[in-house]
Image (cartoon, helix red, strand yellow):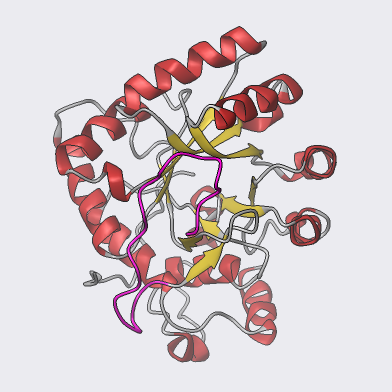
Amino acid sequence: MKTRRDFLIGGSLVAGSALLGSLPAWPAKAAAADSRAMRTRVIPVSGETVPVIGMGTSGSFEVPNGGAEYRALQEVLKRFFAGGGTLIDTAPTYSNAEDNLGPLLEQLGLRKKAFLATKLSGVTGREEGLAQFENTLKRLRTDKVELLQVHNLRDWKTQLAVARELKEKGQVKYVGVTHYVESAQDELADVVKASRPDFLQINYSVTQRGAERRVFPLAKDLGVAVLTNRNFDDGALFNRVKGKQLPGWAAEAQITSWAQMFLKFALSDEAVTAVIPATGKPDRQSDNLKAGLGPLLTPAQKSELIALVG
């Protein structure tokens, strides 16, 4: 997802499992400190919980090493973890995103706190998949990742088998499949039904709600965790609400920006495990994290938002 445009009423956030028996020891996640801690949801296959606000790296981490944008990412990561986030989604085909993310986590001493999700992306065949994953580990400066996903269903049968092979070896904790457009959702649902991965990732926003039809119900029935991307519809949602005030009931849901509103909309579907908005701006990171606090939207509020944005 791309960085949102400047239509926030933001502010900064101040905040601060059981594992599968066959896997090696993985970093434990910190327990919630108090009632203001970020909401979490369960990964069905294991019972482990994950914070509902994650972060993406597409675009936001594809910046020159050492420049101002790179330095801003240090603060983005600091705020993310201080605010209760752990899940970071990336891919080897996001140009140099992995090359930036790995060293930053290492320098900041944050790798052990991170739930790293990456992908087998744009490759065909077992050997290409294994080679790409080994390179990804080097780029991320780690020896394992929490989630390995088959990106956009490319060669999905072979690559999902590769991911499961790596899971058996203890280099991967969970496996998943992804896509990012409405037109691919039926295919994604068919793949999930046939292969039963631990995770799926798909687009979902106020104006792109196709996942509600088949993908979400299927995920709930099969016990598949769901990550949603493009929650801001690549920034288009902010254009739709430009100049508009938040609904009067926003305060009841502890919402102070349109970004929080759009993220809470996605999280208000119980099938959604976490959202993964991308940003390279520290203040926007703080604003995103607030969507993980307080009440979610009621069905009536969701309907009103759909009408308002549509």
Q: Was residue 137 drawn as part of the magenta stretch in this picture? A: no
Tell me where residue 21 appears, x and y as whole percent. Answer: 55, 47
Q: Is residue 96 visible?
A: no
Q: Nearer the viewer, residue 285 or 173?
A: 173
Residue at far front of view: 21
Task: Give how far across and how far down residue 209 sits, in percent.
Answer: 72, 59
| Residue 21 vs residue 305, the one in the foreground | 21
Residue 26 in magenta?
yes
Which residue is at a point 61% across and 73% down the rendered structure image? 268
In the image, is 18 to the left or to the right of 305?
A: left
Q: Position of residue 214 (x, y in %)?
A: 83, 55
Figure check: 22 above or below 273 = above
Closest to the observer, 283 or 157: 157
Please give the name of the residue rendered at 59% of the width and 55% of the height, measured from the top-left corner: 46
Q: Considering the whole magenta stretch, tell me its main secondary structure.
A: loop
Report x, y in % for residue 284. Answer: 31, 59
- Looking at the image, residue 40 lies above or below residue 135: below
Residue 191's place in the image compared with 280, above or below, is above
Left or right: 220 in relation to 227: right
Q: Residue furthest top?
A: 127
- Position of the C terminus, as image quadrant, is bottom right
Give the magenta part as a residue range. Answer: 17-38
Q: Nearer the viewer, residue 108 or 267?
A: 108
In this rendering, would 279 be left or right of 23?
left
Residue at image point 61% right, 28% down: 163
**Residue 225 to residue 8: above or below:** above
Using the rendered image of the protein, determine whether residue 302 is visible from the camera's viewpoint: yes
Residue at 64%, 55% in the rendered image:
204
